Amino acid sequence: MTPKYDSDPTDMSNTNRPYDIVVWGATGFTGKLVSEYLTEQYTQDMISLALGGRSADRLDSIVSELTTQNKGWDSIPTVIGDATDQESLREITQDTQVICTTVGPYTKYGTPLVEACIETQTEYCDLTGEINWVREMIDRFHDAAVNANTRIIHSCGFDSVPADVGTLLIQSFAIENFDTHCEMVRIYLEEGNGGVSGGTLASFAELFDAASDDPVTRQTLQDPY
């Protein structure tokens, strides 16, 4: 899709909205990691960041931690909303250039936010691994997103690392060493480090429930393309 901003899309200093990025679900396990990364890599002079979620007290606690740990941040605004309340999500998305959501299961909580982002022309990214839901979002909202000139980018978390980053590294190696790219790349993931968050477990449960009840979902899981 064509960027809707005339400036460099990596330059977030030119937005006329209050925030460049809202981390939605910032009090959760993964949301906190995303918030920590952003405040470590950037300062408040570089990006306008806000943290979003349901609990003002928990958000304030995260803000206190982050501003104590990172000298580049004196304060971080918070936004309060409900993942199931469409109007609440519209109010949040219309105030930011990008929303990064870590709130899953996306099958349960993701669709209203995608809709709100398209309505308010707000760029969206998530870290879902629920490919049946991703397929549904593409089928339902691709044309609307194109018409709104809005990027909806799924699976930016661990799911993109073996496939997207792994393929990039393999192709770079092939070009550097053999002066050509691979026509096909097959990737197998045998093991990895790190634990599994509660949100990930809940997403798996939703996925298995959907697959057991719906033959179309089972087919999508086998071949989402």
Image (spheres, rainbow, N blue to C red):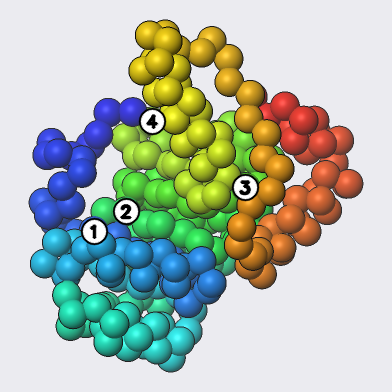
Residue labelled with disc 1 = 20
The numbered mark, 3 or 4, whose residue comes first in the sequence reads 3
Query: Identity of the amino acid at label 4?
Result: Val
The numbered mark, 2 or 1, whose residue comes first in the sequence reads 1
Nearer mark to the viewer, of 3 and 1: 3
The residue drawn where x is 71% and y is 64% is 202
Classify mark 4: helix, strand or loop. helix
Residue labelled with disc 3 = 129
Q: Quadrant of the C terminus?
A: top right
The numbered mark, 4 or 1, whose residue comes first in the sequence reads 1
Give the class, few, some or many, for how many residues have Cα within 10 Å of label 1's Cα (few <14, many ≥20): many
Q: CA distance from mark 3 to mark 1?
A: 25 Å
Query: Identity of the amino acid at label 1?
Result: Asp
Nearer mark to the viewer, of 3 and 4: 3
Q: CA distance from mark 2 to mark 1?
A: 6 Å
| Residue 155 falls left or right of residue 49 | right
Could you tell me if the residues under marks 2 and 1 are in contact, i.e. CB atoms within 8 Å?
A: yes
89 or 162, nearer to the observer: 162
